[in-house]
Amino acid sequence: MEIRKVTISTLKNLGCQPEIDKETGNMYFKYQGEEFCVVVEAETTITFYDTWWGTLDLDDPLLDNLKEAINQTNMNAMPVTLYSISENENKLGVHSRYQLIFTKDTPNKEELFTAILNSFFEVHQEVKGRFSALNDIQDKKEEKERIRIKGFSNSER
């Protein structure tokens, strides 16, 4: 349980007010307006989660573009971005997580946590940028695939 105390102390040093779920032991806190969760996985492993930071309706025609944007982002970035499906709400939810080895002897704890937490926002922007770029490519492709009706011509006689 020492790692839990060190994690709480480090978060408080960053100005966060972690709240502990009494049933799970998970820590919830806000950083730059975003709600995060930290889970102590083992005595030396913790995982940061940023859940439901993006959503898309399951019947949205751009759903495959979002999945592809997530896959492309995961090739080059940490934290890992993933998605889940809530059929009850008819939504695909976008989440990110970052797992690390963390001990009381880890140097520069506050700088490490700051870098990790900031990386979540960078990944948000990366996924959104790739999603937008894929949508632009799809729009251009659809423009090129206009239907041409036989017998009509733009040339003058």
Image (tube, rainbow, N blue to C red):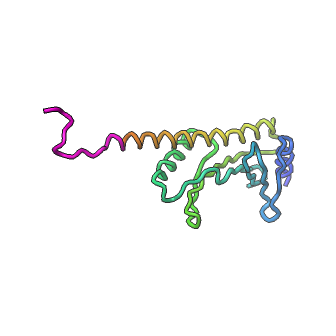
Residue that lies at the very extreme toward the bottom in this rendered image: 88
Q: Over which residues does the magenta segment extend?
A: 142-157
Tell me: residue 90, above or below residue 42: below
Residue that lies at the very extreme toward the left in this rendered image: 157
Image coordinates of residue 121 in percent, x first then y, are: 66, 41
Task: Please state, as top left, top right, bottom left or bottom right, where the N terminus lies in the image.
Answer: bottom right
Counting the numbered discs, the total is 0
Q: Who is closer to the viewer here, 97 or 42?
A: 97
Q: Is residue 81 left or right of residue 148?
A: right
Give me the residue at 69% from left, 48% from top. Answer: 99
Q: Who is closer to the viewer here, 46 or 83?
A: 83
Give me the residue at 69% from left, 51% from top. Answer: 49
Residue 5 falls within the magenta-colored stretch:
no
Tell me: residue 2, above or below residue 108: below
Residue 147 falls within the magenta-colored stretch:
yes
Give me the residue at 64% from left, 50% from top. Answer: 53
Image coordinates of residue 9 in percent, x first then y, are: 87, 46
Q: Is residue 12 left or right of residue 153?
A: right
Tell me: residue 150, above or below residue 28: above
Q: Which secondary structure dominates the residues rendered in magenta? A: loop
Q: Is residue 68 left or right of residue 9?
A: left
Residue that lies at the very extreme toward the top in this rendered image: 156
Task: Please state, as top left, top right, bottom left or bottom right, where the C terminus lies in the image.
Answer: top left
Image coordinates of residue 40 in percent, x first then y, are: 76, 54
Q: Who is closer to the viewer here, 43 or 32?
A: 32
Dividing the picture into quadrants, the one containing residue 85 is bottom right
Image coordinates of residue 43 in percent, x first then y, are: 79, 53
Give me the residue at 61% from left, 50% from top. Answer: 54
